[in-house]
Amino acid sequence: MGLDLKPLSTLHEHASYDVADFVVPTGREEEWRFTPLRRLRGLHNGTASPDGKLLVEVDAAPEVTAETVGRDDVRVGRSFVPADRVSAQAYTSFTEATVITVPQEAVASAPTVLRLRGEDATGAAYGHITVIVEPLAQATVVLDHAGSATYADNVEFVVGEGASLSVISLQNWADDTVHLTHHHARLAKDATFTSFTITLGGDLVRIAPSVIYDGPGGNAELYGVYFADPGQHLEHRLFVDHNIPNCRSRVDYRGALQGRDAHAIWIGDVLIRAAAEGTDTYELNRNLVLTDGTRVDSVPNLEILTGEIQGAGHASTSGRLDDEHTFYLQARGIPYDEARRMVVRGFLGQLIEHIGVPEIREQVQAAIEAELENGLDTGLEQERAR
């Protein structure tokens, strides 16, 4: 295919639509070293049986068009090139794609909701979603994942000149689900892209959002909240490719972990190319460890190829609850267990409050409360035993 988006970067060196162009991962590669390959059910090496079932239901805003198309549709797969073997496998394996189109200058009066429901985790399913926001249009798209599945897909967001797109991706999978997904955003001149990724369910979930710019003035804001329970593997791998002058990006991901073998991975890669003068970027990852037996890997990376930038920085912190915070609340008569819950709510709630769809925000808040109620008691027993 004719599109050449290969990054000139040591962070992301290889891209292709052809699965054969990628070696089968062994776990020693930088991009796979945190992922337990044995738990991927063959999604990474071609041995997955492609007979899984996943349904996509769309509730589109009145101004928005939703279509189911074949893989030969010219709008599908033109804004990105797969950057790893699973993304390429998903691209070559899907049979139907969902295309969402927001017409030029249209302002969607309601969110467009895509409900992805897995029916069975024993076989693999592959999917593709394309969201096109034409110039000067505005829309919100919700990707709501639930059920049991072994699933790999690509989601591409094409945001036109002066357009604005907000995306909310909810991972509410059942406990037996494995999901590997790539979210590719391509921003035209003065386009705005905001994403909220909320990852709560699933056995193993690996999400790889990426952003690239087509014109100056592009603005990308990527937010994420995740809560890892015992045995869960939640991995977020972000790549922001500043390839155009005078563009902006902000990344803020926050997670909490509780229970034995809960594992959270956050990789934040930002490339500022030589031509991208005037870039303004910052990425932040914070993790709150609630119990013993968890593991956090947080790796921010900046690759800067020009000194003519407005600003660039990153930060990463991981640690336990602050004893001073809980003591402060206890001194005001709040019991210890509720004080812990309040600290976690505040830590994650600073991002959840920015979700612009009230019913989604309330759904996420309720899910976090359930996580705290179901799992924090184990942490309290561990804390009291220390």
Image: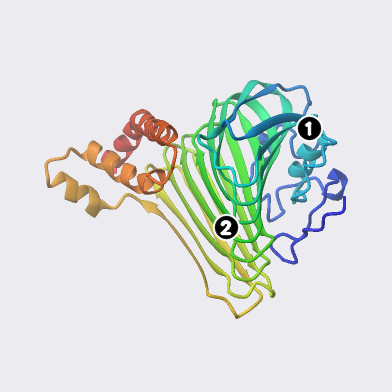
Q: Extreme front residue here?
A: 105
Is 180 or 164 nearer to us in this picture? 164
Q: Quadrant of residue 131?
A: top right
Q: Amino acid at mark 1?
A: Phe
Q: Position of residue 192 (x, y in %)?
A: 56, 54
Q: Is residue 312 left or right of residue 363?
A: right
Work out whether 184 lies above or below 247: above
The residue depicted at 55 percent of the width and 49 percent of the height is: 265
Q: Position of residue 133 (x, y in %)?
A: 64, 45
Is 359 or 375 nearer to us in this picture? 359
Residue assigned mark 1: 94
Is the C-beta separation of discs 2 and 1 under 8 Å? no
Residue assigned mark 2: 268
Q: Amino acid at mark 2?
A: Gly
Circle 1 sits in a helix, a strand or a loop, which is it?
A: loop
Circle 2 sits in a helix, a strand or a loop, which is it?
A: strand
Is 344 or 143 nearer to us in this picture? 143
Work out whether 79 lies above or below 57: below
The residue depicted at 50 percent of the width and 34 percent of the height is: 110
Q: Position of residue 253 (x, y in %)?
A: 48, 51
